[in-house]
Image (spheres, rainbow, N blue to C red):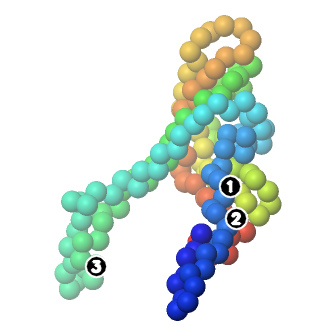
Amino acid sequence: MRCEESSSVTSVSSIPDTPVPFQFRHVKLTINSAEIVEVNSGNIKIDNGIEEDDSRYCNATADNLLSEPIPKVFRVSGTFNINVKDKTFWTFWAAAAEVSSCKLEFLRGSDDKMVITFNGFRIENPESATNLEGVTNLDLAWTAESIAPVATDAVATY
């Protein structure tokens, strides 16, 4: 709501509320061009590796900026907790190869979505809580060289 005071009357007008956050039903995870339907939870950690105390200083010869951070290793990692029915993820892990494509999408429509594309996506350890036949709950640990997030929405002004 917006409240504006004038000389004689205070008027109250309605401003559209910010949309509700994305919810679990809005998630779509695709690994190696195959949709993973049963995603229970997950996390993404982005570590740029920069420490405030780790900086270099300029001089006339080097022509560097004062307190420019020393380049560090950029790391993206996380886990996806999923239900699995076969050994697909163990196969990716055993091959120790980069998965050809990985994408995490939050979708509420064509003009309201967030798409995160992972580059250099690798499965680190397909760890299972059990070794039973049938559906198994799995914490899939992964790393990526970089991510490319793209947000699309219909909000004109924030």
Residue where numbered disc 2 is placed:
152
Q: Give left or right: position of 29 versus 9.
A: right
Kind of residue at badge 1: Val
From what the image shows, is residue 28 above or below residue 18? above
Examine the image and state in which quarter residue 6 appears. Answer: bottom right
Q: Could you tell me how far apart the alpha carbons at marks 1 and 3 are, in whole angstroms?
A: 35 Å
Could you say which is closer to the camera, residue 119 or residue 153? 153
The mark found on residue 50 in the picture is none
Q: Could you tell me how far apart the alpha carbons at marks 3 and 2 are, in whole angstroms?
A: 35 Å
- Mark 2 residue element: strand
Could you say which is closer to the camera, residue 114 or residue 133? 114
Place of residue 112 in the rendered image (x, y in percent of width and height, measured from the top left): 73, 60
Place of residue 93 in the rendered image (x, y in percent of width and height, measured from the top left): 61, 29
Asked whether the viewer can see residue 150, the reply is no
**Mark earlier in primary sequence (1, 2):** 1
Task: Tell me the residue at 20%/86% (across/down).
Answer: 60
- Quadrant in which the C terminus appears: bottom right
Count residues near mark 2 (Cα–Cα under 10 Å), then give few for <14, some for 14-19, many for 20+: few
Place of residue 23 in the rendered image (x, y in percent of width and height, measured from the top left): 66, 44
Task: Tell me the residue at 62%/37% (across/down).
Answer: 97
From what the image shows, is residue 63 above or below residue 137? below
Q: Could you tell me how far apart the alpha carbons at marks 1 and 2 are, in whole angstroms?
A: 9 Å
- Mark 3 residue element: loop
Residue where numbered disc 1 is placed:
115
